[in-house]
Every structure is written in structure tokens, then in C-alpha cells.
Amino acid sequence: MLQDFKDKSKKSLFRTFKMIKKEFRLLRIDPWNLVIALLIPPAIIMLFSFMTEEAGVPPPLPVIVVSNDSNTFINPNNYAESTWDNFSIPYINAVNKSNLLELKVFLNSTEDPYSMEIARQELLLGNINSIIVIPVEFTELLNLGYPGLIECIIDSSRISKIQDNINAVYDSIRIFVNDNNLTPQIKLKGFEEFSVPPGYNQALNANITQLLPLMVFGIANVLTILVIVKENPISRLLLTPIKKSEILISKYFTYSIVLFIQDMGIILATLASGLYIRGSIFELFGALYMIGYSGISMGLFISTLSKSKTEANQLFFASFIIIILLSGLFVPLGSMPIYLNLFAQILPLSHANPLVDSVLSKGTSILEYHFYILLIVSFILNIITFLVFYKRRYEV
Amino acid sequence: MKKSNLKDIIVNVKNLDVIFKKKKIIHEVSFQVFKGEIIGLFGISGAGKTTIIRVLTCQIKKKYWKGIVSVTNLSPKKKGNHSKILRNVGYVPQLELLNLYYDLSPLVNVEIFASNYGQKKEKARKIAKDLFTTLDIPEDTWKNPLEKLSGGEKKRVSMAIGLIHKPKILFLDEPTTLINYLN
Amino acid sequence: MFIITHDLEAALVCDKTAILREGKLLEFDTPNKLISSLPSNGQLARFTIENLNEEIINKIRKYPYCEIVSRTGNDVIEVFIQNFETHFSELIEYILNKRIKIVSMSRDTANFRRYFQIRIKEEEEKENNEK
């Protein structure tokens, strides 16, 4: 009995191994497909790093500063002493100092009561990206040790630009805080904590977080969508003692190896191009591998489901568009209606972005919520793929 | 005609019915085939020739057919028998496209299929070369991608694959230039 | 070895032939046995007739010992009769008496193709009668 089992599993292993060999042979036939999978990702990363290095820092964003702080500051201990707005001007200086902002006009609402209207008009016309408003009694509040809350009205017509605008405004506040030694009074959130240290390619970091998951997932997906539909002799293979599971497992195995090589290439390229990785390289590798595997799972799922190559291509295109649109890259998941949000939660790319982000800029462990969701989603796709493949009739 | 005794029955079909979607495709078919016999299945298309062969080669799920069927004394009704039956059976399908890896060479094609019967590379190569020589496939095409071979050569590679494991039963589906091979 | 085929000439190499029609196995035997199940063991008379038409064929069918008349070409028919040796010459006389012009004639044994055609036709007619 045991001997029989041993014998059977040995035979099964032999067949699976040979099937893997076959998969590699089939892969070699279409070298371009492999080249795309293995070389394009590192190449794109390198390209991005050159491009962004050439351009240096992104162009400064035009702003208008409106100051409402016109009241005379009166020292409660000495009524004779009075100062005019002694913190509005330093802030303007900070704005001028910042590389991320370009001060178009400074408007004082005391002199011109329509300052705000003028600024809004400029924003509406698209001449500026944001209006920075210095609040009433800004100076007084700071002097008394209260945080002076600077208001910022940003152009929200392009959602993807919001973060850039906020970053730029924060940059001016940071300079203002440093120059005036006012650190405790103004709270800075987010920006300082996750900033890229000097010496690294800042712009590359900003772009790559969005690019990497999309690229790894997309390429793994494209690589596998035709793998099963295109292999006509499967029906004939099934007239030999091979099992369906052996055919499918050999495919997962083969493309996992391809993924491994691809991710190594990506890691090397990111290192060479000066990408700042707050977490460890292994964490990045793990995150990329998980994302890639979900791409393979999706691809093989599509390939098993479709009856023809055209169908597979169309299914891929339709699913890919939905996955990208609902990935949070364009519209944040939080701002979606609840039903779309829930649907987006089961799509792989929605979790790929935060996963890469957590390694690159936060340095937190990848073994958290998003990783497990990706794992579960891939696993469920694998199970459905096996079921469909088993149900499918292959006849010669 | 050889004298046949009961022991030599290699295929036994008794009262076979095949029903798809409440439509009876095969009605009460019974026949016996003895070792060494060549059986021709004739009929205009839709007569059920291929369906019978599909039952014999475990391609039709047991819920779709009833009756007694045994192939080399094994019933395709039992799932556990499938791989044993398939080990005894060679199949040459009607369409080469469904049988062969067009981008790979004839030798590699044979090797892939031979591996499913547990044959190692060297053994598979040797058998392949013998079969190719017997089937008159020009040697200079053995390592070319199959795509470049002529239709007849492809058919013969397909034949070689059907014979690679020395099957007890061979099924030929519409071998158009059949007479050429058998002579 | 099983051969699935449309190619009726393939019967030459088959030990046994199975004839299927609409899921029913009509025959399963050696080709020779099947052929000899035809009238007079499959012996037939072949005539090439000038201006062959249905009327002429029906006339020939009326010959008392005639079993099967099948048109196999534009002006060729094959006729199966009972006791071929005894009635062959009588058949020729019958045809000539009907003023049918024979261009050429020969005798032959039916091949598998002919058997197949006759058998399928017979089955079709049987089915039509049942309806």
C-alpha cells in the first residue's frame, strides 16, 4: 500500500517535472514575451531615474498668499509697545525660500478687502495651484504660544495633484518653522515623517510607488493570459496518464520562477537607480513577489476561463481596466461609494499600492493586512482556476 | 482470419447508451473486439463514431453513458482505471493542431508525450527515431519546428506519438491518407 | 486498432467493419460477410445505358427477380438479382425487350462502398416507412 503510494507520487513528480520542462520550452519559443517580462521593468525604473534626475526637482507650484493678519500686536505687559504683523513677512520669506512653491502675489486683506476674491479668481482660472491664507491674529497666536493654523485652499480638480500641493505648502511651513525656531507651535503631520533623505532620488520615489505595483501585476498578468488557451495539445495530453492538476501546477511553478527572476531584476534596477527603500530589500522582494503572484493567478484564471485567444485578450483588457480604475491610483478608495469600495477591496491592485508604499516609505513590515488579503485573493483565484480547469471538457 | 478465444477480447461494449442533454446519441451499441483485429468504424457524420471512441478513451464522464464497457479488461466507469486504460491506448486525432506543439520539433514533441508514460529522454529519443524511420519522416526535419513540416509529415509525427508507448489499442481518427501507411 | 473514417476504401484493410447511423450500430462483421449478405452474395450486373432516366430504372425494377437497382453514375446502374447465374441472361433479354439501349455491360462483385450505401439507404427507407 505504502509502496504503491510512493511509486505513484514518484511517477507524478516525474511527470510534473517534465511538464515544467515543457513549459520552459514553450516559453523559449516566444523570447520576446520573456524579454518583456524580465527586462522591461528594470528598464522602466532606470528610465524613470534618468528622467527625474535630469529634471531635478519638479517645477515649483504657483501660489498666492493672502494675509488676514493685520491687527496691531499689543503687548499686554507694556501697552506702549506695539508691533505690526511680525510673522506674516517671515512666512512670505519661507514661501520664497521653498523650491516647491512659487509666490505669485502677496495680498494683504487690510489694504485690499477683495484680496480673497482676487485670489479665488486666479485659482479658478488655473493661474495658481493654491491659496495660502494666513489667519486673523496669526502673529498674536504664535506669540502667545498657540499654534497658528495656516489655511490652504488647493486646486482639487486633479485628484492626483492634491498630495503634491499639500507637500509643497508643508515645505514652506517647514522652512518657516525652522527659520523662526517655532517648532512646537505648528504641528507637521505626514510630510516630515515619510520624507526621502537627501542623496536619494526623491522624484523617483514619488513615482515608483505607483508604478511598481501596476507594472509587476500587469506584466505577470499579460505573461499568463494566453498560457492555457493557446496550448492546443492539452486535450491530447489528457489522453495520456497525466493528470489535470499536474499540467496546471507545472504552469504555476514555471511562471513563479519567471517571476522570481523578474523581481530580482527589479530589485537590482531600483538599487542602481537610487531608490530609497525605508524597509529592507527582502521586504520589497516579498511585496513584489506577492503582487506578481496575484498577477499570475489572475492571468491563469483568465486563461482557463476563456475559450479562445480573443476571449482571453478581451477578458484581460476588461478586467485590467476595472482593476486599475478601482485600485486607488486615480480615485482614493475612501472617496468611492460603499459598494464600489467593497468591490475594490477584493481587487489585487488595491492592496498592491499600499503594500509597496509600506516598504518604500514607511518601512513597516509587509506581513500585514494588505499582504494577507493579496494572498487570500490569489489563493481563491487559484482554487477557482483549478475547479474551472477540472470542469472543462477537453476533447480531441 | 485468426481464431479468437474469449481471453483475447480487448474491447467489450455491451448495450452502450450515450445521452447528452436528454438526447440519445448512441443507442444500445454492442460489439467485441479481439486482439489483433483492425476495426473500421464507418458512418456519415453525426453517426456517433467519435462518441464511441470517446467513451473507450475515458473522455466522456460516466454520468453521460450507461452499459457495460471494458477496455483491456478495465472499465472506464471507474475513475481509478483511467490512467491504466490510457496507458494501454494510443490515439491519433483527426486534427494535428490539437495534438502537437507546432513550435517545437518532432523529437521534442515525442519526448513530451513519452514523459507522461514515464519514459526518460534517451529512451524516448531512441523510440522516436525508430518510429520516424519506420514512418518515413525525413531525418532533416526531426529537429525543425513542426510548423515547417508538410501536412502528411505532421500526421506521421502524430502517429508516432500515438505509438510511442507501444499501446495495446490504437485509435486512428480520420487518417485521410491511411492506405499509404498501412501498405 | 480502431479506424474512424469517412473513407470507405479503408475497409480493404479492416478485419471487421462497424456501420453506424444516428447512434445505432447497424452492422458489425467482416466486410466480406457483409457484402455476401447482399442478394446473390453480392454479385451484380452493371449496365451503361443511353439516356438513362428514372422511367428506365423503374422499368428495370419491374423485372420479377430484381432485388436492388442503384444508380451509380450519370448513365450507370448496378442491378442485384436473385440467383445471379440463372437469371443474368434473362435480365439482359428483359432489358433489351423493353427497348432500352445498353451501351456497355459487365458483371462484378459489390465492394464495401456499395454495400454501405445500400445498407444506409435501406435503413433510411425503413425509418420513413415507420413514420
Image (cartoon, coloured by chain):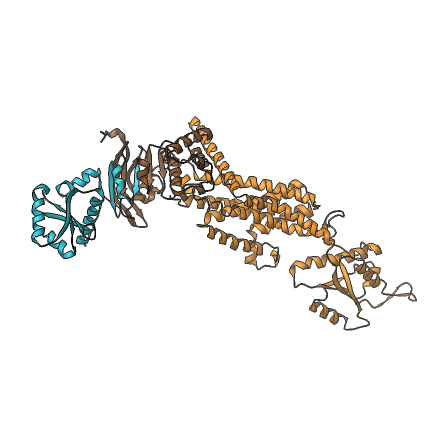
Chain that appears orange? A
Q: Quadrant of residue A335?
A: bottom right
Q: In this view, does A28 lie to the left or right of A239?
A: right
> Quadrant where the C terminus of chain B lies?
top left
- Taking A162 as reference, is B1 above or below it? above
Colour of the chain lettered B: brown
Q: Which of C94 and B51 is in front in this view?
A: C94
Residue that sits furthest to the top in the current view? A3
At a point 72% along the width and 69% down the height, the residue shown is A122
Q: Which of C101 and A395 is in front in this view?
A: C101
> Quadrant where the N terminus of chain B lies?
top left
Q: Quadrant of residue B170?
A: top left
* Residue B58 appears in the picture as rendered: yes
Number of labelled discs? 0
Residue that sits furthest to the front in the current view? C103
Q: Residue B174 appears at what percent x and percent y? A: 32, 43
Q: Residue B107 appears at what percent x and percent y? A: 45, 35
Q: In this view, does A60 lie to the left or right of C79?
A: right
Q: Residue B83 appears at what percent x and percent y? A: 38, 35
Q: In this view, does A357 lie to the left or right of B75?
A: right
At a point 22% along the width and 42% down the height, the residue shown is C112
Q: Residue A112 appears at what percent x and percent y? A: 80, 73
* Residue A135 appears in the picture as rendered: no
- Taking A186 as reference, is B20 above or below it? above
Colour of the chain lettered C: cyan
Residue that sits furthest to the bottom in the current view? A113
